[in-house]
Image (cartoon, grey):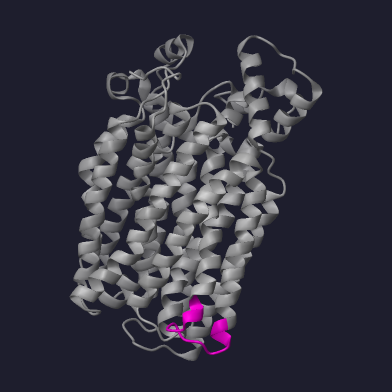
Amino acid sequence: MPTAPSRPVRWYNLLAYGSNDVLGAGSMAVISTWILIFYTSFCGLSAAQATIIFGVARVLDAFTSPLIGHVSDNIGRSWLGRKFGRRRIFILAAIPLLPSFAIMWVAGQSFWYYLVTYVLFEMVYALEIIPYETLASEMATDYKTKAKFAGARILCGQCSAIAAAFLPAWLIAYLGPDSPDTYLYMGVIFSGLFMGAAGLLYAFSWERQRPPELAEAEARDKPTLGAAFAALYRNLFSTLRIRAFRLHLGMYLGGYISQDIYNAAFTYFVIFALAGSTAIVGQLVGVTYIVQLVAVVLAINFALRLSPAAAYRFAALSFGIGVVIFLAMYAAGYTATSALFWLPVVFAGLGRGALNYIPWATYNYMADVDEIVTGRRREGAFAGVMTFVRKMSQALAVILVGQVMQASGFVSKATTQSPTAIAAIVGVLGLGTIAMLVFGVLVSTRFRLTPRTHAILLDEIERFRGGERQPADESHARVVEDLSGWSYDRLWGNNPVAEPGRP
């Protein structure tokens, strides 16, 4: 089934892995930028009804995403898992279901139609993306190769985000600003891209060969369905007992929720506060994503040579400056047609690109920190938590924007809005974005995973595997204790995190 961990990683493996973020980042970019305006302008839904759709999807996701992560960790003992891979079988199964993205964008349907189609795509997304997020750790062990996987992922994701911005603008220019078919055609095109990317991922990826003793233990340990469900959330919540992962989640939430709030409010900000149009939105967002692509390249080098946390702080500062300039120009009375609006776009894009890359680069090392605590590899559990948190954060951002707009008197399908509604949109974009950036920066000051500390971590893991129970020296002990959050004598399974019967 899986191949040896020493298998060389070629350029086409990196490209195939990265291309799958056309689904990960591309779908999220399309949804966060266009779904609210589509629901409220072409489907007749109120902002409150749109937020109900996201809320229901998140409740269901609280069950499905962790379940997929748990199953992918344990399906390796079955015939299907041995034949197709415990991760890759999910990717294969998701390919024919990915056109569910297109049917979300059919205008003129009922509230229930949009609820069901959105929930369906979210489940298919989780089915594919959670196993995908484990593959970098499966295919590589060293810091630099994992960073390359993260870089390939984010670079391809940024390219798909550029398409998510410009494609609607091109379709609007061809079909007209009032045609709902713009969004349907966009959904069809992206569905095709999703299927092609998932096929490449399956063809050019592999999984790490587990040690024989672990495979034998899994073969003996066949829990009942009830026991599996009992272990599910216990194992998932136990990931939060890993200090580096808690800090990583804080940085992730700060960087991504700030962007989700910005994305959800930006379309309304340009159209109603700056007297712009959806075509201008597409152009501004598209240029932002192009700048983000450049920023990812810079962030890859910065994070590899220095500290991911330091790169994160520079990125947050740049994004924040862009937001402040936008607000200052709005206060000064500029409109969206002003050439000066490219200045905040550049600042915001540079910051957002790095904020996209850094959390996913550090995520690839979380299973290593967990291994020194538990003595196990639980990539699936971490992927389940990450996907759930990602979709929950996006939904909360959209819900926040929608509810504030509804409370401020926003009117669906109206070409103009009241001063109160516009002030609410401006306030959410400014205060909401900056508040989350500040939160992420504060968390980053405590995050100390670097190339040097990761090398020490791997060295100590090998010592534990070899039967050693004392650190190479005191500095190594301090490093792994800081990353794990546990004292050295409690590592390698000597703690409640590793005990299946305890939370």
Residue drawn at (54%, 33%), measured in percent from left and top? 144
Relative to 239, is 190 above or below?
A: below
Residue drawn at (43%, 16%), measured in percent from left and top? 218
The part of the chain drawn in magenta is 329-341
Relative to 369, is 386 above or below?
A: below
Indicate left or right for 232 with 252 as reference: left
Relative to 117, is 345 above or below?
A: below
Relative to 57, is 79 above or below?
A: above
Residue 457, by quadrant, is: top right
Q: Tell me, yes or no, if residue 492 can be seen here.
A: no
Picture quarter with the C terminus? top right
x, y percentage for residue 54? 39, 61
Indicate left or right for 468 with 88 as reference: right
Picture quarter with the N terminus? top left
**Number of numbered markers:** 0
Q: Verify whether residue 337 appears in magenta.
A: yes
x, y percentage for residue 62? 44, 47
x, y percentage for residue 189? 22, 56
Residue 225, by quadrant, is: top left
Along the line of sight, the residue nearer the viewer: 395 or 338: 338
Along the line of sight, the residue nearer the viewer: 33 or 357: 357
x, y percentage for residue 452? 68, 32
Q: Tell me, yes or no, if residue 58 can be seen here.
A: yes
